[in-house]
Image (tube, rainbow, N blue to C red):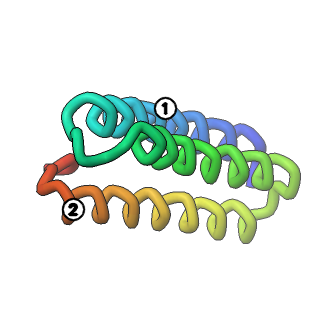
Amino acid sequence: MTKKTIHSVNITLGILFFVICLFLAWFGLVLVPVMNTTTGIIIPVIILLIWLIAYSLQVKFHSSVVFFTSLVIELVVAAIIIIQINQQFGVTILG
């Protein structure tokens, strides 16, 4: 994989994850009194941390295997967290 492809995909995903994390943090802190402050902050931080670790690994080892593996891991973890929030609170984030 070229570094240009890695950067463009990851910056796009980073912006998307950042927007989702801002929404989750706002939702967790303002709208849901059931969640405590720690839970409302930790979920978005975990998503951004996984994205940052995967991005740094992709830049360090710029092969297509590492790129696709970490990309799949990023998307699966984000999907699991979003699905869990949807099931717990009945919030529809995507569609």
Name the front one of labels 2 and 1: 2
Figure quadrant of residue 78: bottom left
Q: Is residue 7 left or right of residue 39?
A: right
Q: Is residue 7 left or right of residue 72?
A: right
**Residue 39 spot, x, y in % from top left:** 43, 47
- Numbered disc 2: secondary structure: helix
Question: Quick one: 28 or 20, which is closer to the camera?
Answer: 28
Numbered tag placed on residue 52 in the rendering: none
Q: Is residue 58 left or right of residue 9?
A: right
- Please give the name of the residue rendered at 32% of the width and 29% of the height, measured from the top-left corner: 26
**Residue 55 spot, x, y in % from top left:** 70, 47
For this orientation, the residue located farthest to the right is: 60
Q: Where does label 2 land, which residue?
A: 88
Report how far apart the C-alphas of labels 2 and 1 lie in the structure: 25 Å
Q: Identify which amino acid the numbered label 2 is placed on.
A: Gln
Question: Quick one: 24 or 1, which is closer to the camera?
Answer: 24
Q: Earlier in the sequence, mark 2 or mark 1?
A: 1
- Numbered disc 1: secondary structure: helix
Q: Is residue 46 left or right of residue 44?
A: right
Mark 2 nearby-residue class (10 Å; few <14, some 14–19, many ≥20): few
Q: Identify which amino acid the numbered label 1 is placed on.
A: Ile
> In the image, is residue 33 above or below residue 92?
above
- Please give the name of the residue rendered at 31% of the width and 39% of the height, measured from the top-left corner: 28
Mark 1 nearby-residue class (10 Å; few <14, some 14–19, many ≥20): few
Q: Where does label 1 land, which residue?
A: 15
